[in-house]
Amino acid sequence: MAYRDLRAFVKRLEKEGELARISTEVDPVLEITEIVQRLGREAAIPQGLKPYSSQAGHAGAEAPTPGFGEANHAGAKGLGGLGPALLFEKPKGSSVPLLINAFGSERRMNLALEVDALEEIAERIRGFVDMQSPQGLLDKLKMLPKLAELGSFFPKSVKSGPCKEVVKHGEQADLLEFPILKCWPEDGGRFITFPLVFTKNPENGKRNVGMYRMQVYDARTTGMHWQTQKHGAEHFRRARAKDATGKIPVAVAIGSDPATALAGMLPIPPDLDEMMFAGFLRKEPVEMAPCETCDLEVPANAEIVLEGYVRLDEMRTEGPFGDHTGFYSLEGEFPVFHVECVTHRKEPIYLTTIVGPPPQEDFYMGHAVERVFLPVMKMQYPEIVDVALPAEGIFHNLMIVAIRKSYPGHARKVMNAIWSLGQAMFTKVIVVVDHDVNIHDYREVVWKTLCAIDPERDVQFVMGPMDTLDHAARMQDYGSKMGIDATRKWKGEGFARPWPGEIKMDEGTKERVRAIWGRLGLKG
Ligand SMILES: Cc1cc2nc3c(=O)[nH]c(=O)nc-3n(C[C@H](O)[C@H](O)[C@H](O)COP(=O)(O)O)c2cc1C
Ligand SMILES: [Mn+2]
């Protein structure tokens, strides 16, 4: 059974010993951040310090061994966590409790998505992706349950829902009643960090849901941090092209059942409904209730809903904001959200998160996305064996890819594929290695990559769109990327020298030493 709402998830976390309640008054201005950071510093297991484990089985150049890859997943386990989820019952200046770090460990991500391992979701996706047109009658019959399951994911419109237990129009609507965080000292103000922002494509009416931070300017005005390549920004541009002086309706839901809350960050194609994907994840449709003041729908189980509009002729300075990168995003001009109506549950819970120097809670959310979408990536590019996004690479700065190399130039083909694949377009550095490198062991990756490259020959630069948050790019949103071909080089790539084998002791000698070990008087 899917979680009914956020509070059902909170209950489960508590039952599992994954939640701490804080009844002391704490200030959402900076203090909550510092508490979360202290817990994180103590609890996080730096991945780089994991025990060294070289992947067995050196394959000779141009002769990849079959049966590789699966063992690579072992390395992705045991990412630790950032301490428990925290429910601040008395945030200073607000009567609304605040939930943070709800997804800050691999275990809590599994609980959120109701799986024992993320692989299960990947497996379900594979099941659908593998569906081919049925051949005979038997095949057709076999597909029926899958198709029925697909149908059950579509969001379901309902008349109303708990999110409307309290409705406040106009002057009564007041964002300042919620414990909105000021995360870092130089932040431009308080920011809503875990919203689901709903808009419609003005051309075809299709829904988009994205997680975009919102700077609070006053009781009824916020920023709308639609980075230029994101779907919200595209809706804004298309509407503006039709009527530059108009406005578009926008609704924001804060806090819902965990799969729905997380759906806002999914890197899925434009015009694909994130709420349908949430239905797939929770195996039950998301119930959507109509807004009070505009033609949009929001999850009926949401804790808090903000309804309003964004004017197409208005921009305002947003930021600075202590960001995913571990640095401040500088000020920039972004659209403005005007709140006309606030609805919420009785005794709502305010869901939020903090980004900052890695790893933070978003690392565990991003890691889940990486694991869940890997089968989709492999479907399109079957040569991809595995990918790894180290926390320090903050999603867009570094992707390590293991491929089964089959032809000259294959590593570069994969780089180009990644740079043209949805939000993977932002990847600043791609390292491509052979399939027998354990890419979740970063020491092994550094060692084997550096041994495998002739830098001038194996590094490729390209220009393209950059993540808005990249402060080193020559211009905002546009800059260069680098691909490193760290695969073994082939004759077909102009490499005439022999490629050496990796050093490994033979089993016979190991066995003989094992037998006499006890007599040597050595530890270990
Ligand atoms: C905690 C958190 C905060 C985020 N803040 C922003 C943001 O302010 N602006 C933005 O464009 N993307 C932000 N993102 C990334 C988007 O949620 C992500 O790219 C998502 O896929 C966008 O949805 P879209 O593809 O429908 O545009 C954030 C992600 C997380 C996890
Ligand atoms: Mn989208």
Image: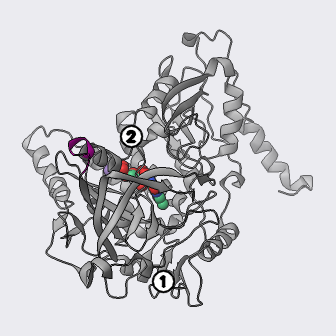
> Mark 2: few, some, or many residues within 10 Å (few <14, many ≥20)?
some
Residue 278: x percent and y percent?
30, 61
Q: Residue at x 63, y 12 (%)?
A: 495
Q: Is residue 175 above or below residue 501?
A: below
Q: Which quadrant holds the N terminus?
A: bottom left
Q: Amino acid at mark 2?
A: Gly
Element under label 1? helix
Quarter containing ligand 1? Answer: bottom left
Q: Is residue 481 above or below residue 175?
A: above
Instruction: Please state which of residues 295 and 357 is positioned toward the viewer in this rendering.
Output: 295
Q: In this rendering, would 487 be left or right of 505?
A: left
Number of numbered discs:
2
* Image depth: mark 1 or mark 2 in front: 2
CB of mark 1 near ligand 1 (< 8 Å)? no
- Residue 506 horizontal side relative to residue 244, left or right: right
Q: Residue at x 60, y 46 (%)?
A: 393
Residue 299 vs residue 82, the one in the foreground? 299
What amino acid is at disc 1?
Answer: Glu
Residue 511, percent from left and from top: 75, 44
Residue holding disc 2 = 422
Res. 224 visible in picture: yes
Secondary structure at numbered mark 2: helix
